[in-house]
Amino acid sequence: MSGMGRILLLQIDGKIPNLALMRITAHHRARGDEVELRYAPSIGAAQRRLGDAFDDVYASLIFERSRPIAQEIRRIYPRACIGGTGWDLATTLGNLGITAPPDYSLYPRFRQSLGFTQRGCRLGCPFCVVPRKEGTVREEATIADIWRGEPWPRELLLLDNDFFGQPRWRDRIAEIREGGFKVSFNQGINARIISDEAAEAIASVNYRDDGMKNRRIYTAWDNRKDEAVLFRGLRRLVKYGIKPDHIMVYMLIGYWAGETEEDWLYRAARLRDFGCRPYPMPFVRNNLTRGFQRWLVGAYDKRISWPEWKAANCEPRNLKTRGGLALPLFDVLNEASGQTKSIGAVGQLRRVGATVDGGCQARVAVTR
């Protein structure tokens, strides 16, 4: 419909602004429609409110674990347009005839500039939907295209799944560096295949977490078989001045056949020894995989063994005191505050949990 319609947008998951919903907002406001954004992280939050009457409803989800919420939305609003990697790969803004640039006013507290310099990925990891969703690597936008301009801060949240896969990545790095931008490579970089030139390029820019507070590079270790190539890449990053503590490494767990806890512990220990920040990403989310994630992200592993943590049912309140003093109770995301990956995950994953594709972090939206 056209003009003075009421439009409801439902963001089901993800913690950063949803680029697709921002573009849908711009499309409808240009037609004179009234747009309302609601967060719907639970079935209860998706229910109608008193007085609700909308002409169009859109919903976006990243993770398959959010599908029950989307199904409830479809029950409540049978004509709702639902999209995102957690729902399907067919519903795109292009298919809906939406070409408008993002309307940032949908998220008034968000100050960064959000976007892609490229789409697609060179790799074909079995747990990642990016190649099927976006195809091979292609250029998308320059830094000037993405930045909102004055008076907004020179802070970029890049959603590229394979930044160094694009032919003109050197131009994009130069634009970031010469423009004095802080940049978060939000979906991560692939340390397994990073070159010396690319490692030096990363070190030359003001790389940050997605809150722009801490120095942070994101990458991933999905398979123990990649140990040699991963650490070769990590050493290259350090060679050009990136501190190991600046590197957060997502560990895919609960995916490979025959995978054991010993494998998880080995990878975590190797990363701790190198000085990186390990962050387990469960493909299948259960008490064990989530407990392992909490053990590492909360830095409990520095104070208590994995067997002791399991014996406490992975709950800090069940830990015994030592020397009369209770063990520090870290929040599960305390160590990673400011860069929890809106989860995310690396690459956009069509799965029950969240994971990582060599370096690309999944979290973003309906289908932007």
Image (tube, rainbow, N blue to C red):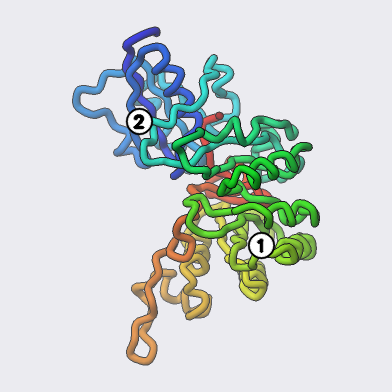
Q: Name the residue under label 1.
A: 259
- Under circle 2, the secondary element is strand
Q: At 66% from the left edge and 62% from the top edge, which residue is drawn?
A: 259
Q: What's the residue type where badge 2 is placed?
A: Leu
Q: Marks 2 and 1: which is nearer the front?
A: 2
Q: Is residue 124 above or below residue 269?
A: above
Between 114 and 303, the residue placed more toward the observer is: 114
Q: At 64% from the left edge and 69% from the top edge, which residue is drawn?
A: 271
Between 267 and 159, the residue placed more toward the observer is: 159
Specify few, some or many for label 1: CA neighbours under 10 Å numbering under 14, 14-19, or 20 or more: few
Q: Mark 2 points at which residue?
A: 37
Between 287 and 367, the residue placed more toward the observer is: 367
In which quadrant of the rendered view does residue 52 lie? top left
- Left or right of 25 on screen, residue 186: right
At which x and y percent is residue 117?
65, 36
At which x and y percent is residue 62?
51, 39
In which quadrant of the rendered view does residue 133 lie? top right
Q: What's the residue type where badge 1 is placed?
A: Glu
| Distance between the alpha carbons at the discs numbered 2 and 1 | 41 Å
- Under circle 1, the secondary element is loop
Q: In this view, does 1 lie above or below 151?
A: above
In this orientation, does residue 350 appear? yes
Q: At 54% from the left edge and 35% from the top edge, which residue is drawn?
A: 147
Specify few, some or many for label 2: CA neighbours under 10 Å numbering under 14, 14-19, or 20 or more: some
Residue at far left of view: 50
Q: Which quarter of the rendered picture does the C terminus lie within?
A: top right
